[in-house]
Image (tube, rainbow, N blue to C red):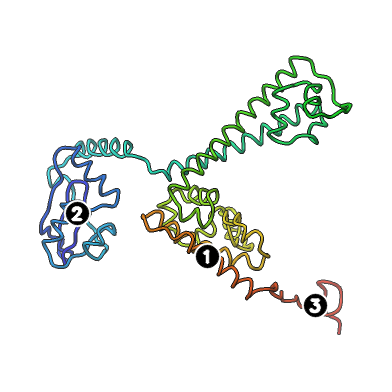
């Protein structure tokens, strides 16, 4: 049976038994034109040369799963088809690949790819804010330790950046107390205030990034947002590396995204495997008793995968229906497993000291 083989320099129809080339369509000599066809192949499309050769035979097999609409995929060793036999040199391949690289890097980026970078940027901002907040508390706490009980996080940084000295902070808070902290000179207070001002800038950028993420995730994946809400949907997409990648994963992998360390620890040491990853943030999971969380996580991962496929491939909006089905499944799990499972009791030792021989 003929098999369709695509190389960077051409498309070939080959007899899969004898290896004889029955027909061929070579790529253009212009590197830019060839690069355009290869870019279409990398995007998962089928080029006209492949369709033309596929129409030459009533029934064919294909060497690439991408071509499955033209025939049944099959393994085939096509290493004997080399570019030199058809007038293409190594320099020609070099030129084509350069053109292909320039073409692919200049293509528009899907919004879910921007979402992945935004989530990772948000994680960096959160980590930076925590580090600066800890440093500010330790530093300014030597001067005014009582402020940690009067203001938290953003409010703490705002007060220190605005006033610096204890007097102004106490006046704004409307509190009268005598601080046990040590006195700072003017330069020390200015340095601590500058750190607090930097922390305020990080907090502002964190809020702007969170708003940006909410806008993107609502537009890019409405089904996932309806089922999981925006932040959790964005986390799953980020961990998977993109919406298309998430839609291609099995539901068991979606269930454990974010729990990779626990899974590797289970594989290494034989400890209990994780039941859930980042989807633990969903209220129905983290509020559930421990013995129900595995089943609920499995149900949520399955629905999340359906929602991701709908969003990735332009399906209709079914987010509300998926959410209702998930909530119905949660109620069924709670009804079927109201009590924790009975743990088997360990057998008691027979007589004697622990680890010793039993008495007779």
Q: Which residue is mark 3?
A: 348
Residue 23 rendering spot, x and y as whole percentages: 10, 56
* Residue under the point 26% across and 39% down: 100
Mark 2 and mark 1: span between their CA atoms?
56 Å
343 lies left or right of 220: right
Residue 219 rendering spot, x and y as whole percentages: 44, 47
- For this orientation, the residue located farthest to the bottom is 360
Q: Residues within 10 Å of mark 2 (few under 14, many from 20)?
A: few
Q: Residues within 10 Å of mark 1 (few under 14, many from 20)?
A: few
Q: Which residue is mark 2?
A: 80
Residue 139 rendering spot, x and y as whole percentages: 75, 27
* Residue under the point 85% across and 79% down: 351
Total residue callouts = 3
* Residue under the point 58% across and 65% down: 296
Closer mark to the observer between disc 3 and disc 1: 1
Q: Earlier in the sequence, mark 2 or mark 3?
A: 2
Closer mark to the observer between disc 2 and disc 3: 3
Mark 2 and mark 3: span between their CA atoms?
69 Å
Residue 187, placed above or below residue 360: above
Could you say which quadrant of the image residue 96 lies in?
A: top left
The N terminus, quarter of image: bottom left
Q: Earlier in the sequence, mark 3 or mark 1?
A: 1
* Residue under the point 11% across and 61% down: 56
């Amino acid at each position: 049976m003929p098999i369709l083989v695509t190389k960077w320099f051409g498309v070939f129809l080959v007899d899969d038994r004898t290896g004889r080339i029955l027909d061929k369509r070579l790529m253009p000599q212009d590197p830019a034109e060839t690069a355009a066809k290869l870019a279409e192949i990398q995007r998962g499309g089928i080029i006209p040369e492949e369709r033309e050769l596929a129409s030459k035979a009533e029934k064919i097999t294909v060497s690439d799963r991408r071509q499955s609409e033209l025939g049944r995929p099959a393994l085939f060793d096509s290493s004997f088809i080399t570019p030199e036999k058809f007038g293409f040199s190594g320099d020609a391949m070099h030129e084509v690949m350069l053109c292909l690289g320039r073409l692919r890097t200049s293509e528009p980026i899907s919004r879910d790819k921007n979402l992945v970078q935004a989530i990772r940027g948000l994680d960096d901002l959160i980590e930076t804010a925590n580090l600066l907040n800890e440093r500010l508390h330790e530093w300014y706490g030597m001067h005014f330790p009582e402020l940690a009980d009067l203001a938290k996080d953003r409010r703490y940084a705002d007060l220190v950046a605005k006033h610096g000295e204890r007097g102004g902070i106490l006046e704004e808070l409307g509190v009268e107390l005598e601080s046990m902290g040590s006195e700072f000179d003017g330069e020390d207070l200015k340095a601590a205030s500058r750190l607090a001002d930097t922390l305020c800038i990080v907090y502002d950028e964190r809020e702007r990034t969170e708003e940006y993420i909410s806008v993107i995730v609502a537009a890019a994946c409405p089904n996932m947002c309806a089922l999981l809400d925006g932040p959790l949907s964005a986390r799953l997409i980020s961990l998977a590396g993109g919406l298309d990648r998430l839609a291609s994963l099995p539901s068991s992998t979606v269930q454990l995204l974010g729990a990779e360390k626990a899974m590797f620890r289970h594989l290494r040491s034989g400890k209990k495997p994780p039941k859930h990853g980042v989807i633990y943030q969903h209220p129905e999971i983290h509020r559930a008793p421990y013995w129900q969380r595995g089943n609920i996580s499995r149900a949520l991962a399955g629905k999340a995968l359906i929602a991701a496929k709908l969003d990735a491939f332009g399906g209709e909006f079914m987010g509300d229906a998926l959410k209702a089905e998930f909530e119905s499944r949660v109620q069924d799990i709670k009804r079927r497993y109201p009590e924790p499972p009975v743990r088997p009791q360990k057998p008691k030792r027979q007589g004697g000291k622990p680890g010793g021989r039993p008495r007779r």
